[in-house]
């Protein structure tokens, strides 16, 4: 009668190692027939791999944007140039109407008139620094004439509004029309091209909400 065979035993063989005087780099792969407890054999990832995986899982991108749902509680200033008033009045009406549609109260809207678009920037900066408003709309109309005065005013108005927002830390929204003629201006202040004053108000609402709820 045959005796029961003994269970096979695990045979360990010595690891082949390079000589101490070998000039192999530390990244050289060492062949071994011995029992290995590396990540590939045991199923456990190395600490570096685990850390990298956790970092990828927890570093989800966060998207932040302003809301256009409701503007209740937000306060706005509107700086309006009196020059080309037939256009700027229509832009102002479009902005105020849009604010009302988004539940901005009339008492939270203040309108400040200035002589022309050139003067908008300094007033907008003063209003932004006052701390009373969540955003400042800058409304005007510059129409090209026979001289280079148009270029000077248009460029100064744009840079003035930009500087006002940067220096005050409050969104100052550029709503100054720069048109070739009166027809273009009227088309953009309630005509077939829409009302840019209303568009400016929407931009102000979104930026005010972004600053109020996410960037304080």
Image: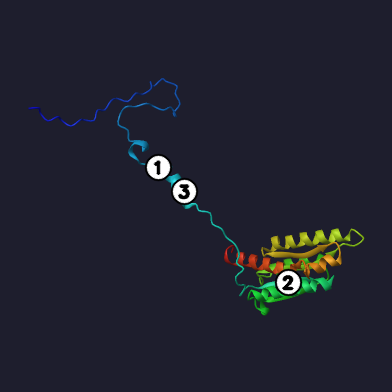
Place of residue 24 in the rendered image (x, y in percent of width and height, measured from the top left): 44, 23
Place of residue 21 in the rendered image (x, y in percent of width and height, measured from the top left): 41, 20
Q: Are marks 1 and 2 in contact (CB under 8 Å)?
A: no
Judging depth in this view, the residue of 126 and 175 nearest the camera is 175
Labels 3 and 2: the sequence-earlier one: 3
Place of residue 53 in the rendered image (x, y in percent of width and height, measured from the top left): 44, 46
Q: Are marks 3 and 2 in contact (CB under 8 Å)?
A: no
Labels 1 and 2: the sequence-earlier one: 1
Residue at 37%, 38% (x, y): give it: 39
| Spatial separation of the CA atoms under disc 1 and disc 2 | 58 Å
Residue at 60%, 67% (x, y): give it: 67
- Left or right: where does residue 178 sit relative to residue 77? right
Q: Residue 14 carries which label?
A: none
Within-10-Å neighbours for mark 1: few <14, some 14–19, many 20+: few
Quadrant assignment for the C terminus: bottom right
Residue receiving disc 1: 47
Which residue is farthest left? Answer: 1
Helix or strand or loop: what does disc 3 sit on? helix
Judging depth in this view, the residue of 173 and 86 nearest the camera is 86
Which residue is farthest front? Answer: 1
Q: So how many labels did they put on this image?
A: 3
Whether residue 82 is visible to the viewer of this picture, yes or no, is no
Location of residue 24 with respect to 72 vertically, above or below: above
Residue receiving disc 3: 55
Helix or strand or loop: what does disc 1 sit on? helix
| Image quadrant assignment for residue 149 | bottom right
Residue at 71%, 65% (x, y): give it: 173
Helix or strand or loop: what does disc 2 sit on? strand
Quadrant assignment for the N terminus: top left
Residue receiving disc 2: 78
- Left or right: where does residue 60 sit relative to residue 69? left
| Spatial separation of the CA atoms under disc 1 and disc 3 | 12 Å
């Amino acid at each position: 009668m045959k005796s029961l065979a003994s269970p096979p035993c695990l045979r360990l063989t010595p690891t082949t190692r390079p000589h101490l005087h070998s000039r192999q780099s530390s990244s050289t792969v060492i062949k071994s027939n011995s029992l290995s407890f590396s990540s590939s054999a045991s199923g456990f990832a190395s600490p570096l791999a685990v850390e990298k995986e956790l970092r990828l899982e927890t570093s989800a991108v966060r998207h932040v944007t302003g809301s256009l749902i409701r503007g209740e509680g937000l306060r706005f200033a509107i700086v309006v140039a009196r020059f080309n008033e037939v256009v700027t009045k229509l832009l102002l009406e479009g902005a105020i109407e849009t604010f009302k549609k988004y539940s901005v109260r009339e008492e939270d809207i203040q309108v400040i008139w200035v002589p022309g678009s050139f003067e908008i920037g300094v007033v907008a900066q003063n209003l932004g620094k006052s701390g009373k408003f969540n955003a400042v709309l800058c409304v005007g109309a510059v129409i090209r004439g026979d001289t280079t005065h148009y270029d000077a005013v248009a460029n100064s108005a744009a840079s003035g509004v930009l500087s006002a927002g940067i220096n005050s830390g409050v969104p100052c929204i550029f709503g100054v029309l720069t048109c070739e003629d009166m027809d273009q201006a009227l088309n953009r202040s309630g005509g077939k091209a829409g009302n840019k004053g209303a568009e400016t108000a929407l931009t102000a609402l979104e930026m005010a909400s972004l600053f109020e709820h996410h960037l304080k």
